[in-house]
Amino acid sequence: MLDGSVILKDFPLLQQTGADGRRICYLDSGATSQKPKAVIDAVTDYYEHFNANVHRGIYEISERATEATEVTRKKVRDFVHAASTSEIIFTRNATEAVNLVARTWGEANLKAGDTVILSEMEHHSNLVPWYMLAEKIGIRVEFVPVTDEFRLDLDTYRSLLKNTNAKLVSITGMSNVLGTIPPVKEMARDAHAAGALFLMDGAQSVPHMPVDVQDLDVDFAVFSAHKMLGPTGLGVLYGKKALLNAMPPFLGGGDMIGKVHLGSFTCNELPYKFEAGTPSIAEEVSFGAAVDYLNALGMENVFAEEQRLTDLAIARLSEIPGLKIFGPRDGDRGSAVSFTLDYVHPHDTADILGSRNVCVRAGHHCAMPLHERFNVPATTRASFYIYNTEEDIDRLCEALMYVYKLFG
Amino acid sequence: MDDMYRELIIEHYKNPTYRGKLDPCDHSYEDENPSCGDELRIMLNVDENNVITDARFEGHGCAISQASADLLLEEVIGKNVDEVKNMTKEDVLDLLGLETLGPARIKCAMLSLKCLKAGLYGVEGHAWEDII
């Protein structure tokens, strides 16, 4: 069993204390995670010892930088169990990775009347790129509904696959608001049976649970380094090699080319074909340290400990007067726990919690359609990660009781 | 920051004096903070001397946005429209009894004055910093 109170010692930011002398209570890892010292040190190490551009320099520090970024690519390949490093494309973030698929695979393979199936619980980053494609080439967008039990309505999903010209299903592996974990493997199998591809938005699932892209048999998966102990400015697109090879390039520029002549170019091989320009070298290097950190803990253990904390949080939150949780009470769910209090607006809740150094997020969490579905303008969200403890849940509940005292 | 939720704000949020409708009304203005979901509608009656004779607001949102609307309407009733046009961010903070607000909450506090001034000037789609 993991122990958050031991783990948090590795995170410099989590040593901060507030005016009351208590350490910061960080419950917003769904937005971005904190970084262990090892990751921060890896950034510094790169800039102090081998800062040079990659792939071109024939001198020691450049070769070292190139090697370090490729080592991370191998670590990421193994972390999500991809078949090859050529299937691991570095992007700016998960959002850019979704846009890459929409703009390259989507524009090359979809035509007016084709359908992309999404769900009501998607993050805006897995909605808007497809809406933009709908505006540009006339594809249709359909939504798998979320049930009153906060699960995807799989019967409707299957009927959408059957009754529309579905070419792609793009669904989150874990809702950033509800915590809901849909049955991705089963949904991908159904999509394939209907002749559609499957993209998993792993921004929330990859940091928090074991993910095996080959076992899930997803065609594409996207995730962001900064939500899994790594740096900002770096994301990953996983794609099956045959698909990536057949796709046109995304951004044009250096590194993504094979040859350039006056008036023409050829593409580089995978994965560089989709990596134009100087990459985020310091970020790629330090992301390797983040993956190492998670591997040392073991993703099975990470998931188990977060489940334990989440169950406890849900039980304790249920004792707060007027509190309603938006998300499954148990079963397959991640550590995002969103709620409302029936006497106070979520922004006031988050503000008062913030003044007590309890960091939560309030708003629509980039999932406005989901909030419309449940008819609330906003929710407050606490999200847990490996460095959280039972004490953090005490702090959350204590602060919420203070909100109740003020507004209840 | 706990100071922000002093009695005045909570009282005006829980028991607003000017929440409701003016029917009929001379002017009605709506505005929102899309990032928070705060929504506000302000209704005014203005006499022949350009003096605001009555005002009400409807909407939903956080305590800061709703209390500031209630306090602002209390302040502007009996005032000339030109005086209201000259009101500033500091005037609203004074009404709320606050010296300052962080970047995330200042928009909530200013929604009411932005709505009112945008209505009086007839401008739409402006950031509050442009109007207030």
Image: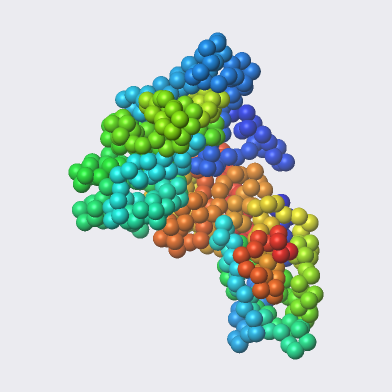
Give the residue at x 55% y 21%: A53
Is residue A230 visible to the viewer in this orientation of the structure? no
Q: Quadrant of residue A90?
A: top left
Quarter of the figure with the C terminus of chain A: bottom right
In the rendered image, the residue lying farthest to the front is: A262
The residue lying toward the viewer, choosing from A313 and A171, is A171
Q: Is B102 situated above or below A90?
A: below
The residue that appears at 54% across and 25% down in the rendered structure is: A281
Residue extending farthest top = A60
Residue A164 place in picture, x, y as percent: 24, 55
Q: Position of residue A278 (x, y in %)?
A: 53, 28
Q: Nearer the viewer, residue A327 or A289?
A: A289
Q: Which residue appears at 41% of the width and 60% of the height?
A: A373
The one nearer the camera, A357 or A42, is A42
The residue lying at 69 percent from left, 75 percent from top is B120
Colouring convention used in this rendered image of the protein:
rainbow
Quarter where residue A24 is shown = top right
Looking at the picture, does residue A405 appear above or below residue A398?
below
Q: Quadrant of the N terminus of chain A?
A: top left
Q: Is residue A368 left or right of residue A82?
A: right
Give the x, y percent position of residue B68: 69, 66
Residue A2 placement, left or right of B116 = left
Q: Confirm whether residue A313 shows in the render.
A: yes
Above or below, A167 against A145 in this view is above
On the image, the x and y values in percent for residue A240 come to 31, 32
Image quarter of residue B73: bottom right
Query: Tag count in the figure?
Result: 0
